[in-house]
Image (cartoon, grey):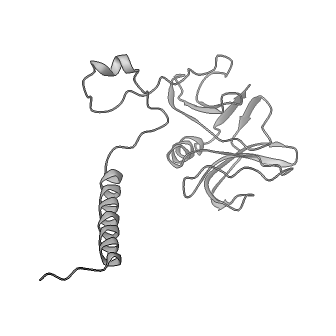
Amino acid sequence: MAALLPSWVTVTGLTAGATVAVVFLAVQAEKGPHPTAAAVRPSASASAGAHPSASPAPAKAPGIPAASGTGRRVVYALGDKRVWLVDATGKATRTFTVWPGTVSPDPGTYTVTRTKASTTGSDGVQIEHILYFAYKSGLSVAFSNAVDGSSPPPAAAGKQTSGIRMPKADGAALWTFGTEPDTKVTVVK
């Protein structure tokens, strides 16, 4: 005669099995492709007859603002919250969105005046790739990224912040581009 197991043993076994399955699926998902903000989602009608491709088509980034100068420069559009790295021929080599602080630089042309590999931001977050280029309301305005790649937390009520944060990979690219001597930063509306 077979002995019956108490119900708690059955529930515990099922829970343990489900946990193992979820962990396995999470590990498998982590190994797969991850969507990015630039990915374009196809419409339902486009998806119906579409064939799978190696990678999703990136969204077309906006062009360099017309009134942003010429030559090699960093262009920062306040309204778009976007940065372009522009080479000497006037071609954008990279563009990305940023998280501005509560204090923004005035439109105009600046030069990167100082760089710092890493420090702690005014919000207590470890930051790196800091490129200082302007000064406003008693604060130094600089590009940077969080060491852990996170977006900045919202500023506390009434607190002024002047850091312009970006994702980690974009911060590294801006650092490489912006540490060249006499790098110009053009700020447009």
Q: Can you give x and y, in whole percent of width and height, for residue 173 in the image? A: 51, 43
**In the image, residue 164 above or below residue 91:** below
Q: Position of residue 107 (x, y in %)?
A: 77, 28
Q: In terms of image quadrants, where is residue 135?
A: top right
Query: What x and y, as percent, mark residue 81?
Result: 66, 33
The residue closer to the viewer here, 115 or 6, is 6
Q: Is residue 148 left or right of residue 114?
A: left
| Closest to the observer, 26 or 174 | 26
Q: Residue at x 62, y 39 (%)?
A: 98
At 59% across and 22% down in the image, what residue appears?
64
Q: Nearer the viewer, residue 24 or 41?
A: 24
Residue for point 73% across, 58% down: 123
Above or below residue 67? Residue 173 is below
Quarter of the image for residue 147 reads: bottom right
Q: Nearer the viewer, residue 13 or 40?
A: 13
x and y percentages locating residue 129 in the rendered image: 59, 52
Q: How many marks?
A: 0
Left or right: where does residue 111 sit relative to residue 128? right
Please give the name of the residue rendered at 29% of the width and 67% of the height, measured from the top-left corner: 17
Q: In which quarter of the view is residue 27 placed?
A: bottom left
- Tell me if residue 61 comes above or below residue 167 in the rendering: above
Image quarter hosting the N terminus? bottom left
Residue 151's place in the image compared with 41, above or below, is below
In the orientation shown, which residue stands out farthest toward the left? 1
